[in-house]
Amino acid sequence: MTSAPVLEHAILPVVPGREAEFELAFAEASAIISAMPGFVDLTLSRSIETPNEYLLLVHWESVEAHEVGFRGSAAYQDWRRLLHGFYEPFPVVEHFARVLDA
């Protein structure tokens, strides 16, 4: 029996005025994360009410695939270089397990 993927959730507060630049950088960075072992899929959505905030949802096969595999990889340094300068404050990342589908 295969367990359901783990969902990583992060609200990304982008410095106001840098949204277009962030979206371009994220498009480039998405190739990095999607090539990682244990990556399933992701969505990036922009807030309608707060246009400088983004919702990142990433499905991983496990928390370890994200925390150890991705964050411990050399490729993560490229991800950081591309994206971490856009956030103020730095985002909180949490992992969720599916409880119910409707």
Image: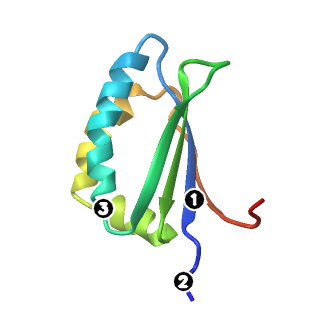
User: From the image, which quarter does the C terminus lie in?
Assistant: bottom right
Q: Which residue is at a point 57% across and 89% down the rendered structure image?
A: 1
Q: Residues within 10 Å of mark 3 (few under 14, many from 20)?
A: some
Q: Residues within 10 Å of mark 1 (few under 14, many from 20)?
A: many
Looking at the picture, does residue 50 appear above or below residue 91? above
> Residue 12: x percent and y percent?
52, 34
Label 2 element class:
loop
For disc 3, the marked residue is 36
Q: Quadrant of residue 20?
A: top left
Q: Report the amino acid beneath label 3.
A: Met
Q: Which residue is at a point 75% across and 67% down the rendered structure image?
A: 99
Q: Report the amino acid beneath label 2.
A: Thr
Residue 39 is labelled as none
> Residue 92: x percent and y percent?
57, 44
Report how far apart the C-alphas of labels 1 and 2 lie in the structure. Answer: 15 Å
For disc 1, the marked residue is 7
Q: List the single residue furthest toward the bottom.
A: 1
For disc 2, the marked residue is 2
Q: List the single residue furthest toward the top.
A: 17
Is residue 45 shown left or right of residue 21? right
Closer to the chain start, of discs 3 and 1, is 1
Label 1 element class:
strand
Q: Which residue is at a point 41% across and 68% down the rendered structure image?
A: 65
How are the residues colored?
rainbow
Circle 1/circle 2 CB separation < 8 Å: no
Closer to the chain start, of discs 1 and 2, is 2
Q: Nearer the viewer, mark 1 or mark 2?
A: 2
Q: Quadrant of residue 10?
A: top right
Report how far apart the C-alphas of labels 3 and 1 lie in the structure. Answer: 15 Å
